[in-house]
């Protein structure tokens, strides 16, 4: 099996499931199972989950180069304005025929939640909620043609804490140039000055989260999307196909149009960056742009698009079978998925703002 495919298997194993029916799954014991090595045996589902991962608008903390983590900060005027520009793009706002979202999600942190509401047209840049009388607006596409977008077209924005930023511990609220140790020292000094520090007490510091912890909640979110999409697709074809025949249900003819489940997710730079590196790291261009700290650059309101392509395959025991239930698990079908990078840190929807360089970083 190619190295890229093997890498995918490693990162997705935690959310694989044993399938006893097309839309009904139960968690498998991944420590005792391994996948068939024959790549030709993969049976892709006729649907794809397309993740539109969008970073929130610029905040006062971003402007001042301050670490936020799971703390929060209001959007700047520029952040609000660019969210408003994004709301006019038919390729991101989910309100035109160019793209319709199956699900729309946002982090529960204020900066992300407000950005999402503006981009999706749930409120304007002044914070006014769109009412029933504002159901349509006319904008122009890239070719100058008038198009009619539907405002609030049955958009149900789901607030999901699994999409919140990585918790960055004692550095939250301090300049990015400070190290972990320097930030702890600053907190100690502040506690002493405020008479809040006693030798027999610990200084309260913000939660610190590991990359593994953040990836765990992110992959749990992806796994729930795969399951829900599988259930939805099964429901849509109920009565049209023999759902007991996994082979017939999961193979897609080259000439058949597959179903795309577009998912809008307004999140944060470190979490999106974690998802990118854990899923499509091998697919990144060699010359992608970096931040001053050396991380993958994800500008505010940039959009990264990743396809999640589920497939079914048989599992088998990695060792000798022991126990009463082994025979029942050996050879059963499991649902897994591959990732494909579609767009990286795309800011083309912000082209109306002359201060935005839409040519960097490189896009696929």
Image: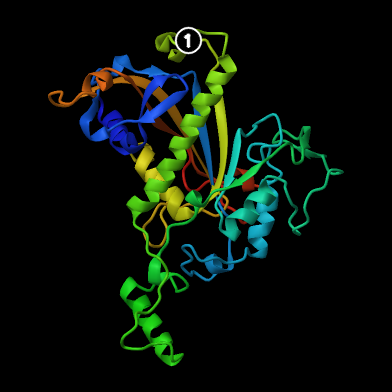
Q: Is residue 238 left or right of residue 314?
A: right
Q: Is residue 326 left or right of residue 18?
A: left
Q: Which SS class for mark 1?
A: loop
Q: Nearer the viewer, residue 66 or 158?
A: 158
In which quadrant of the rendered view does residue 120 lie? top right
Q: Position of residue 93 (x, y in %)?
A: 67, 41
In which quadrant of the rendered view does residue 257 lie? top right
Q: Position of residue 336 (x, y in %)?
A: 37, 28
In which quadrant of the rendered view does residue 142 lie? top right
Does residue 314 lie above or below 274 as drawn?
A: above
Q: Position of residue 85 (x, y in %)?
A: 69, 49
For label 1, the residue is: 253
Most extreme residue toward the right is 133
Indicate the quadrant containing the N terminus: top left, top right, bottom left or bottom right: top left
Q: Is residue 320 left or right of residue 163?
A: left
Q: Is residue 352 visible?
A: no
Q: Nearer the viewer, residue 88 or 269?
A: 269
State the residue at coordinates (72%, 46%): 121
Does residue 306 lie above or below 327 as drawn?
A: below
State the residue at coordinates (74%, 51%): 123
Most extreme residue toward the front is 324
Q: Nearer the viewer, residue 349 or 326?
A: 326
State the residue at coordinates (33%, 71%): 180
């Amino acid at each position: 099996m190619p190295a890229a495919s093997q890498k995918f298997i490693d990162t997705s194993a935690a959310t694989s499931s044993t399938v006893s029916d097309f839309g009904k799954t139960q968690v498998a014991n991944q420590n005792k199972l391994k996948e068939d090595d024959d790549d030709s045996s993969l049976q892709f589902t006729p649907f794809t989950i397309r993740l539109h991962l969008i970073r929130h608008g610029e905040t006062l903390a971003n402007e001042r180069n301050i670490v936020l983590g799971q703390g929060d900060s209001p959007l700047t005027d520029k952040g609000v304005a660019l969210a408003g520009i994004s709301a006019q793009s038919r390729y991101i706002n989910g309100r035109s025929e160019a793209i319709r979202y199956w699900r729309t999600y946002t982090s529960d942190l204020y900066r992300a939640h407000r950005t999402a509401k503006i981009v999706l047209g749930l409120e304007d840049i002044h914070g006014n909620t769109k009412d029933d009388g504002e159901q349509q607006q006319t904008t122009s596409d890239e070719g100058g043609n008038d198009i009619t977008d539907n405002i609030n077209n049955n958009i149900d924005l789901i607030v999901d804490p699994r999409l919140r930023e990585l918790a960055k511990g004692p550095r939250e609220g301090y300049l990015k140039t400070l190290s972990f140790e320097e930030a702890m020292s600053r907190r100690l000094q502040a506690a002493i000055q405020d008479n809040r520090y006693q030798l027999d007490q610990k200084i309260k510091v913000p939660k610190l989260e590991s990359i593994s912890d953040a990836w765990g909640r992110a992959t749990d979110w992806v796994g729930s999307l795969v399951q829900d999409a599988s259930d939805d697709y099964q429901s849509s074809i109920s009565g049209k196909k023999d759902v007991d025949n996994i082979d017939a249900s999961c193979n897609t003819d080259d000439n058949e149009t597959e179903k795309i489940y577009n998912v809008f997710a307004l999140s944060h730079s470190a979490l999106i960056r974690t998802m990118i590196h854990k899923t499509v790291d091998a697919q990144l261009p060699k010359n992608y742009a970096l931040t001053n700290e050396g991380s993958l650059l994800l500008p505010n309101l940039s959009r990264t698009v990743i396809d999640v392509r589920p497939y079914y395959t048989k599992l088998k025991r990695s060792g000798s079978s022991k126990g009463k239930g082994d025979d029942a698990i050996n050879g059963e079908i499991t649902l897994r998925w591959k990732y494909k990078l579609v767009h990286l840190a795309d800011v083309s929807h912000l082209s109306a703002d002359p201060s935005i360089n839409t040519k960097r970083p490189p896009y696929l």
